[in-house]
Image (spheres, rainbow, N blue to C red):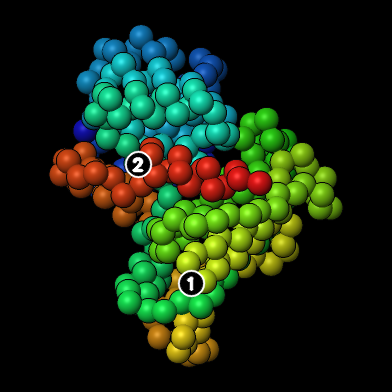
């Protein structure tokens, strides 16, 4: 199997690690500079003309979000499956919608990488919700951006910069994605997006969404400035309160643990890559998070 990666940052390296666990693979990376450092056994390419010389099985798009559209447009001529790191784009634009229509017309298989759909506790919670009357949902994800990459100035990374596609609402679109996956599309959305915290960055550092459904509402809170990381899902039903601790991969019902998994977060990257290869590429199944669904979720994310 031959795979090309556009963008070789930290998230791309997680996808590379996942690929290596799934069998023999030749990995190439399209680099922006010939001075780029080599990474493990990855072969560097520097132009799109070089891509034409190799019969790739699929492409991974994991460059900065603001550059996704440009990369995808250039890759469309090859008509190969696309594994695209979330979020799909950094903005809503009529030209992006045209790209999606071109992908559909060409019959190109796509998957937008939202690995929390493969977290055991969330998968188990999805099964538990079948036929259950929900009264209220609360989603929370707070972490401290300066501690993400302690060796670099956090104000210079893409997450802090609006023009690079940064912002907690885009970085943590995972929370919106799994809420959509668990509950479906809301009837109405209101949101508050702010960048007024002590971090003093121009990208959104606080986001609060209210998703309204026919019989209940879901509140989603995201931030970059919480010193102690917290990532949780609370579902209040007619009979019970379910609490999913995403960091510990466990579920509590009425404060009593009813499910825990030994699955590490890194394993979710392997699971989603296996899903993409086995079921989307080889099995020819429609992806459960293709460009159309991801663009719909992006619209929900950016609505204000």
Pointer 1 residue: 215
Q: Residue at the spot x=29%, y=13% of the render?
A: 52
Mark 1, mark 2: which one is toward the viewer? 1
- Identify whether 216 is placed above or below 198: below
Under tag 2, what secondary structure? loop
Circle 2 residue: 290
Query: In the rendered view, does 82 fall on the left or right side of 7?
Result: left
What is the C-alpha distance between the residues marked 1 and 2?
28 Å
- Residue placed at 31% from the left, 49% from the top? 288
Residue 139, percent across and down? Answer: 57, 66
Relative to 47, is 133 above or below?
below
Q: Are marks 1 and 2 in contact (CB under 8 Å)?
A: no
For residue 29, which quarter of the picture? top left
First along the sequence among labels 1 and 2: 1
Above or below, 97 relative to 202: above
- Picture quarter containing residue 249? bottom left
Q: Is residue 186 above or below residue 105?
A: below
Q: Secondary structure at mark 1?
A: loop
Q: Nearer the viewer, residue 187 or 267?
A: 187
């Amino acid at each position: 199997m031959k795979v090309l990666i556009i963008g070789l940052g930290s998230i791309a390296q997680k996808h590379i690690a996942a690929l290596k666990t799934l069998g023999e693979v030749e990995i190439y990376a399209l680099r922006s500079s010939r001075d780029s450092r080599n990474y493990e056994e990855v072969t560097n390419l520097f132009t799109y003309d070089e891509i034409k010389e190799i019969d790739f099985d699929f492409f991974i798009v994991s460059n900065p979000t603001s550059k996704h559209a440009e990369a995808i447009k250039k890759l469309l001529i090859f008509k190969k499956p696309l594994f695209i790191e979330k979020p799909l784009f950094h903005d809503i634009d009529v030209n992006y919608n045209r790209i999606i229509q071109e992908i559909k017309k060409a019959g190109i298989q796509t998957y937008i990488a939202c690995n929390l759909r493969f977290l055991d506790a969330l998968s188990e919670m999805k099964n538990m919700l079948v036929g259950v009357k929900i009264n209220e949902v609360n989603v929370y994800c707070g972490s401290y951006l300066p501690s993400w990459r302690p060796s670099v100035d956090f104000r210079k990374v893409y997450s802090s910069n609006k023009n690079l596609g940064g912002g907690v609402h885009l970085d943590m679109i995972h929370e919106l994605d799994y809420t959509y996956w668990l509950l479906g599309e809301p009837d109405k959305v209101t949101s508050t997006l702010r960048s007024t915290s002590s971090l003093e960055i121009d990208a959104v550092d606080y986001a609060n969404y209210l998703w309204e459904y026919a019989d209940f509402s879901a509140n989603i809170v995201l931030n970059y400035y919480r010193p102690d990381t917290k990532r949780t899902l609370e579902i209040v039903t007619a009979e019970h309160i379910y609490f999913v601790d995403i960091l510990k991969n466990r579920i509590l019902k009425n404060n009593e643990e009813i499910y825990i998994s030994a699955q590490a977060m890194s394993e979710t990257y392997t699971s989603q890559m296996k899903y993409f290869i086995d079921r989307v590429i080889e099995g020819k199944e429609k992806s459960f998070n293709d460009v159309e669904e991801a663009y719909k979720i992006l619209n929900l994310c950016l609505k204000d």
